[in-house]
Each structure stands twice: as C-alpha cells, then as structure tokens.
Amino acid sequence: MSKRLSKTLAAEIATRTLEVINPANRGVALAAALRRHGFDPTVSELPASPADRAELVAWLLATYAPRE
C-alpha cells in the first residue's frame, strides 16, 4: 500500500462515520469516506457495525497506516 492514513484523517473519518444516525448505513459512509480520500475499502474487511470512535480510529490506523 503506497498511501498511509494520518491520525488526524483517521479521527475525522471516524467522527463523520459515527455521525450517521442509522448504524446500518455507517459501513456505507465509512467506505465512501475512504474512497473519497483515495483508499480502497474492501467490504469484507470493513467493521460490521462501527459504534465506538476509539475502536474505529484504532481499526483505521491498523488497516491503512500499518507500522513498518
């Protein structure tokens, strides 16, 4: 993966994703935000129903900003 996700962008994406009222639509919002910022979301790897901001930020960083 050539592009890395910053901590700030991960926090912004998580916050905006959790602002979506319907939990069933949060996955769609998350995938759209990732695509908008140039990341390729794979539906199978997206969290089923993100509900906690800290957990979502941690998942985003682990997935799109792996430590080398």
Image: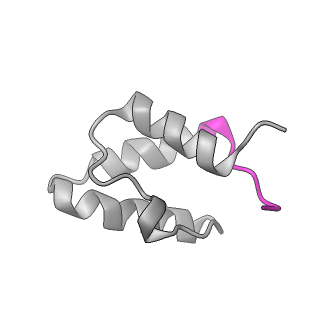
Q: Look at the magenta stretch and give its main secondary structure.
A: loop
Q: Quadrant of the C terminus?
A: top right
What is the basis of the colouring in this image?
one colour
Q: In which quarter of the image is the N terminus?
A: bottom right
Q: Magenta segment range? A: 1-8
Q: Residue at image x 70%, y 45%?
A: 65
Task: Measuring from the top left, give residue 3's x and y in whole percent.
Answer: 77, 59
Position of residue 48 in the picture relative to residue 35 (left or right): left
Q: Residue at image x 23%, y 63%?
A: 25
Position of residue 8 in the picture relative to residue 42 (left or right): right
Q: Residue at image x 27%, y 39%?
A: 51
Task: Measuring from the top left, give residue 32's x and y in whole percent.
Answer: 44, 69
2 inside magenta stretch: yes
Looking at the picture, tell me which residue is in the foreground, 61 or 19: 61
6 inside magenta stretch: yes
* Residue 12 visible to an observer of this rendering: yes
Task: Measuring from the top left, give residue 7's x and y in whole percent.
Answer: 64, 36
Quadrant of the rendered image containing residue 61: top right
Residue lying furthest top: 54
Q: Residue at image x 51%, y 41%?
A: 59
Task: Measuring from the top left, give residue 56's x and y in whole percent.
Answer: 43, 39
Position of residue 55 in the picture relative to residue 60 (left or right): left
Residue lying furthest left: 22
- Please determine whether, in this image, residue 12 is positioned above or below residue 33: above
